[in-house]
Image (cartoon, rainbow, N blue to C red):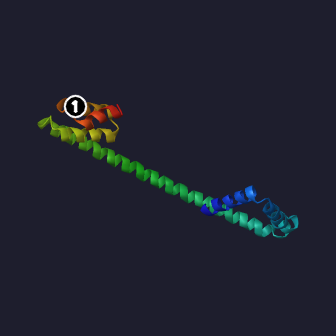
Amino acid sequence: MYFLSILLFILGWIYYSRPEQIQKINNFFKANVFNDRYILIKRKKIGVLFFLLAFFFSTSAFVYSIEEKALAKNTASNNLIVREILNDTAVMYTQTLKDDPDNIHLIMKLALTFDALGDYKKASLAWAKILLVDPHNDIARKRAHDKY
């Protein structure tokens, strides 16, 4: 792909700034590529080339789609595992907070866990609780107003 982009850039530059080169490029393609006699003589080789290119691109696309499906499956299963771990962590912090309900560090960890889970309502409640215990907590004040 990089080669193709560099080639197209060079052709664009030549067409834009070198009008004398345009005629040479066009004459080359007329004589060698778009010459009817040449195409008729080399038609079988050209046909085989097109078949090989078609085979190459179709197998590449097939392999790429299989890899993408496998990656998507792995990502989805990894996301489920992460969510499960975060849910377990939130439960653990909640149970620990029953013994020490004003522990700002635990409440902050719980709020961050809810943020990671995307449960912004519970996270907002946790940040608000931190502000009740410590009204001067800059992190809680900022985070309480970030997403909620």
Which residue is rendered at x = 41% and y = 53% of the image? 74
Quadrant the C terminus occupies: top left
Relative to 129, residue 10 above or below? below
Residue at horizontal 71 percent and vertical 57 percent from the top: 12
Q: Nearer the viewer, residue 137 or 37?
A: 137
Residue at the right extreme, as displayed: 37
Q: Residue at x 67, y 62 (%)?
A: 7
Q: Nearer the viewer, residue 96 or 48?
A: 96
Quadrant containing the N terminus in the rendered view: bottom right
Residue 113 left/right relative to 62: left
Quadrant housing residue 46: bottom right
Which amino acid lies under the numbered mark 1 shown in the image of this protein? Answer: Leu
Q: Is residue 40 above or below residue 129?
A: below
Across and down, in percent, residue 125 comes to 26, 30
Residue 18: percent from the left, percent from the top?
A: 76, 60
Task: Give percent across and percent down for residue 55.
Answer: 65, 62
Task: In this rendered view, identify the residue nearer to me: 87 or 119.
Answer: 119
Task: Please give the residue where the numbered disc 1 appears in the rendered image.
Answer: 131
Q: Secondary structure at mark 1?
A: helix
Q: Residue at image x 46%, y 55%?
A: 70
- From the viewer's perspective, is 94 left or right of 148? left
Residue furthest out toward the left:
99
Image location (x, y in percent) of residue 23: 82, 62
- Callout 1: few (<14), some (14-19), or many (20+) C-alpha neighbours within 10 Å? some
